[in-house]
């Protein structure tokens, strides 16, 4: 008996590669990423030697030159752009926003937020692509992120990937322009490459939404970069919309954070908190510890008081007054615990607006 054997042939279809989530996110966000060129007049030596001609020739005394650059990203169709404050901090420089199509537009600087190192610009153009803003409070350790920017002012549309390596980090940053040293707090740490020129560009998630603003890298260390949480920028944008400016809560006293060295120097009973104290000023002599008419003055604070708690939160090196103020609005009244002449005292202070 003959048996018939049937052979099944499997027809293999061509392999279809699924689009990478990184590629999808970058394609969604990239049209809204801009470069920010910084230029200004530089003083040049009056004479220089031309080797090719073997003679000296005269330079103009001042020549406009490129001084640096950074990145930014569009967050509203009418031309609102977010970047770092340190990218546009030189008041004597000229700034130019360069769109993805190469178009160059001089921006208006709407606001600078020195506490969070954020700046808001505006260009006169409508119908622009935007990057949606995510929620940085929902970031988790190990979450994938993508940094986009204009590396070194040369390599446009540079993309690097990494993960969230840490949250609520604090670093000391120094301005290239003014050499001013400031503390940046609440930062997102990442191993995604963030380089000079990347500053101000977006850090996005796989949905293509901005969760941070690329801010800094740590020199001398590998795979350590930082971004500003986008929720700080969202607050600034809301302040601009409601009041036309970024408002900052204000107390109206000068102080020194107390550590063991300050405790010994001023013979204090404790080694923590904030000591209300005047500070020397070269031009005006001794500044007052309590500013007249300020919230501190109205609350009854005095020089040599030690601030122990603000809004029921203890003042420490890890929890500074400026950190606590970020959670409150101008006009709110909060409790203030102080130490005066060895006795604790509870006051109330109504937050004012810093001019």
Image (tube, helix red, strand yellow):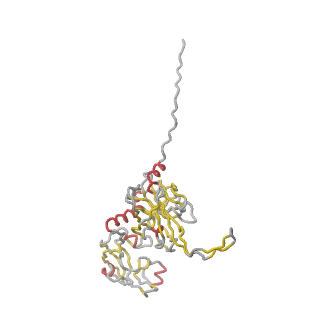
Q: Position of residue 329 (x, y in %)?
A: 32, 69
Residue 18, compared with residue 133, is above or below; it is above
Q: Position of residue 56 (x, y in %)?
A: 66, 74
Quarter placement of the C terminus: bottom left
Which residue is found at the position 49% from the left and 68% from the top? 171
In this view, the residue in front, 291 or 79, is 79
In this view, the residue in front, 20 or 191, is 20
Q: Position of residue 132 (x, y in %)?
A: 39, 56
Task: Tell whether 344 sits left or right of 25.
Answer: left
Count all numbered tags in the image, as a single digit: 0
Residue 296, compared with residue 134, is above or below; it is below
Quarter placement of the N terminus: top right
Q: Residue furthest top?
A: 1
Q: Residue furthest bottom?
A: 285
In this view, the residue in front, 241 or 100, is 100
Q: Examine the image and state in which quarter residue 221 appears.
A: bottom right
Q: Residue furthest right?
A: 54
Residue 205, compared with residue 302, is above or below; it is above
Q: Position of residue 76 (x, y in %)?
A: 38, 59
In this view, the residue in front, 234 or 262, is 234
């Amino acid at each position: 008996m003959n048996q018939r054997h049937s052979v099944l042939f499997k027809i293999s279809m061509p392999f279809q590669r699924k689009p990478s989530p990184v590629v999808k996110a970058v394609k969604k966000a990239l049209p809204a990423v801009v470069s920010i060129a910084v230029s200004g007049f530089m003083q040049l030596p009056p004479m220089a030697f031309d080797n090719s001609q073997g003679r000296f020739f005269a330079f103009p005394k001042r020549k406009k030159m490129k001084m640096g650059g950074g990145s930014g990203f569009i967050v509203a169709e009418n031309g609102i752009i977010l970047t770092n404050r340190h990218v546009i901090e030189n008041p004597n420089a000229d700034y130019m926003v360069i769109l993805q199509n190469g178009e160059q537009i001089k921006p208006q600087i709407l606001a600078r937020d020195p506490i969070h190192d954020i700046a808001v610009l505006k260009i006169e153009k409508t119908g622009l692509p935007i990057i949606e803003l995510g929620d940085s409070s929902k970031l988790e350790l190990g979450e994938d992120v993508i940094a986009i920017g204009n590396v070194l002012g040369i390599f446009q549309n540079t993309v690097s990937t990494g993960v969230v390596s840490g949250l609520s980090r604090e670093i000391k940053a120094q301005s290239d322009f003014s050499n001013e040293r400031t503390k940046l707090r609440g930062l997102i740490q990442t191993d995604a490459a963030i380089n000079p020129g990347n500053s101000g560009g977006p850090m996005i998630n796989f949905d293509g939404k901005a969760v941070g603003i690329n801010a800094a890298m740590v020199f001398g260390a590998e795979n350590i970069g930082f971004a500003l949480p986008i929720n700080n920028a969202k607050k600034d944008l809301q302040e601009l919309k409601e009041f036309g400016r970024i408002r900052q809560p204000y107390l109206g006293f000068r102080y020194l954070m107390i550590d063991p060295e300050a405790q010994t120097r001023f013979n204090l009973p404790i080694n923590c908190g904030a000591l209300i104290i005047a500070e020397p000023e070269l031009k005006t002599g001794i500044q007052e510890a309590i500013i007249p008419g300020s919230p501190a003055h109205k609350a009854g604070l005095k020089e040599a008081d030690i601030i122990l708690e603000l809004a029921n939160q203890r003042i420490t090196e890890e929890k500074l007054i400026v950190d606590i103020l970020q959670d409150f609005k101008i006009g709110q009244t909060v409790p203030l615990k102080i130490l005066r002449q060895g006795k604790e005292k509870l006051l109330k202070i109504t937050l004012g607006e810093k001019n």
